[in-house]
Amino acid sequence: MVNSILKDLVVLYVEDQKDAQDELKHVFDRTFKKTIVANNGDEGLKKFLMHKKRNYNIDIIVTDINMPKLNGIDMIKEVKKYDKDVKFVLTTAYTDPEYLLDSIELGVTAYVTKPINIMQLLEKIEYAYKQKIDNDKLNRIINKMKEHNIKEVEEFFEILDKETKKEESNENLYLSDGFSYNFKNKVLLKENKTISLVNQEIMLLEYFIKNSNKILSYEELLQAISINSSENTSLNNLRTVIKSLRKKSSKDLIMNLSGVGYKLILE
């Protein structure tokens, strides 16, 4: 059984074959927090850079290798110029040693051959994401060790313990008026009461939190609550989601800047 960690992921799926794309996209839309689809490596790179510019992180890139305009390997090389930590899962009909060697040198440790076994693919995606989590945590610890010139094993484990406790405390983020948001369970909390959120409310609130105290345009926010890149989300829908978030939490949670956009204020 695939871990529920998958429901929190933002995945970029790059595939040029329409039939394969439609089949997997249907599964991805029901599995992940958000699926962004691209038809070739060039389009995949552009969508990755567009989301990175908006400070909206992509967790995993699932990509075919042999595609027009820019193949999967070359796309990965370009992506890594901007983000060395992003993880990749390759889907390919080829077992060419040259492709596999290139992918290993690029740090790609998960691939699935076509025809694709969907459960195997989801397990590979979960594996790749767990690697990303572990790498992020290890890099923070290494930086702290360098900062404090730590060389003893005992001190290493002290830092590891502090990082673990810090992560646990960071699961809850205070918002306003006694409300907090739990990242692990994707719920609002107040006075030991749990308030459930629907998918678009979760995506929008987390995007606001990542960009707190910044004015966000309507276009950015519409993109943040789109389930996929081809969906046309209306401004009225955005206002409805914001109204619902305010109703479930505080009316002062999200500031409206008429004609410009919205802003989440965190103290």
Image (cartoon, rainbow, N blue to C red):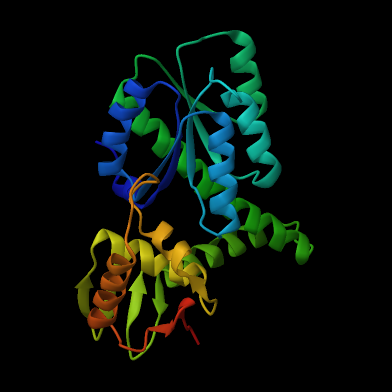
Q: Is residue 136 left or right of residue 231?
A: right
Q: Nearer the viewer, residue 24 or 175?
A: 24
Measuring from the top left, give residue 186's x and y in whole percent.
30, 64
| Image quadrant where residue 153 sits | bottom right
Q: Is residue 251 above or below residue 204?
A: below
Residue at the spot 57% in from the left edge and 60% down from the top edge: 160
Q: Is residue 144 left or right of residue 36?
A: right
Q: Assign the N terminus to one quadrant of the image.
A: top left
Q: Is residue 242 above or below residue 201?
A: below
Measuring from the top left, give residue 211's x and y in whole percent.
52, 70
Report whether residue 164 is seen: yes
Residue at the spot 56% in from the left edge and 20% down from the top edge: 68
Residue at the spot 26% in from the left edge and 35% down from the top edge: 26
Q: Nearer the viewer, residue 164 or 98?
A: 98
Measuring from the top left, give residue 75's x and y in whole percent.
61, 31
| Image quadrant where residue 36 sits | top left
Measuring from the top left, give residue 129's x and y in whole percent.
46, 42
Residue at the spot 67% in from the left edge and 32% down from the top edge: 77
